[in-house]
Image (cartoon, grey):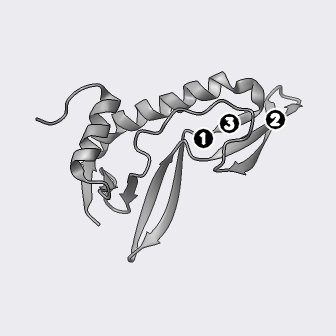
Amino acid sequence: MTEVPIPKEVLAEILEKIKSYFKSYNKSISGSGYYLKPVHFSSRQVEGEKRKYVYLGRYWWKVLYLGRTKEGKVKLKWIYVGKTKPSGLPEPPDNPLEGVSIYIKEGQDDFYFIDLKGGKIELIEKIEKILGKKISE
């Protein structure tokens, strides 16, 4: 495994752009009662270090409207559906970083780490496509 540290502010722009794809998609399916979570964090221990993994557009939820409280706040019930798109919904946008492991290491919060399984050139090309500009020569 080849892991590369990337300053958080550099990758944050990319993650925000990808999240916006999923937020737009959720607006388009808002009447369906389903929701595709734009970003999810999951913590686990790997080789003795705590990592927080970032997953984009992976998990589906069913949202049930339960009415309003006495104070007027909306009451919702969220039911986890899984990783498979519910039938009858249009295809969600592609995740351009699908297959790329992104995580934060405990104690190194200024960086995201990326596992370069696919190779550095492929990752740079994906990032440039998302940003719409060159980041390398």
**Pointer 1: residues within 10 angstroms few (<14), some, or many (20+)?**
some
Q: Do the CB atoms of the residues marked 3 and 1 lie less than 8 Å apart?
A: yes
Which residue is found at the position 63% from the left and 29% from the top? 26
Quadrant in the picture for residue 123: top left
| Amino acid under disc 1 | Lys
Q: Please indicate, yes or no, whether residue 25 appears anywhere in the rendered image.
A: yes
Q: Which residue is mark 3?
A: 35
| Amino acid under disc 3 | Tyr
Which of pointers 1 and 2 lies earlier in the amino acid sequence? 1
The residue at the far bottom in this view is: 48
Q: Quadrant of the N terminus?
A: bottom left
Which residue is found at the position 70% from the left and 32% from the top? 89
Mark carried by residue 75:
2
Q: Secondary structure at mark 2?
A: strand
The residue at the far left in this view is: 137
- Badge nearest the viewer, 1 or 2: 1
Disc 1 to disc 2, C-alpha distance: 19 Å
Mark carried by residue 37:
1
Disc 3 to disc 1, C-alpha distance: 6 Å
| Amino acid under disc 2 | Lys
**Pointer 3: residues within 10 angstroms few (<14), some, or many (20+)?**
many
Which residue is found at the position 67% from the left and 42% from the top? 85
Q: Quadrant of the C terminus?
A: top left
**Pointer 2: residues within 10 angstroms few (<14), some, or many (20+)?**
few
Which of pointers 2 and 3 lies earlier in the amino acid sequence? 3
Vertical comparison of 127 with 81: above or below: above
Q: Secondary structure at mark 1?
A: loop
Q: Position of residue 69 (x, y in %)?
A: 86, 32
Horizontal side of 7 relative to 91 (left or right) equals: left
Disc 2 to disc 3, C-alpha distance: 16 Å
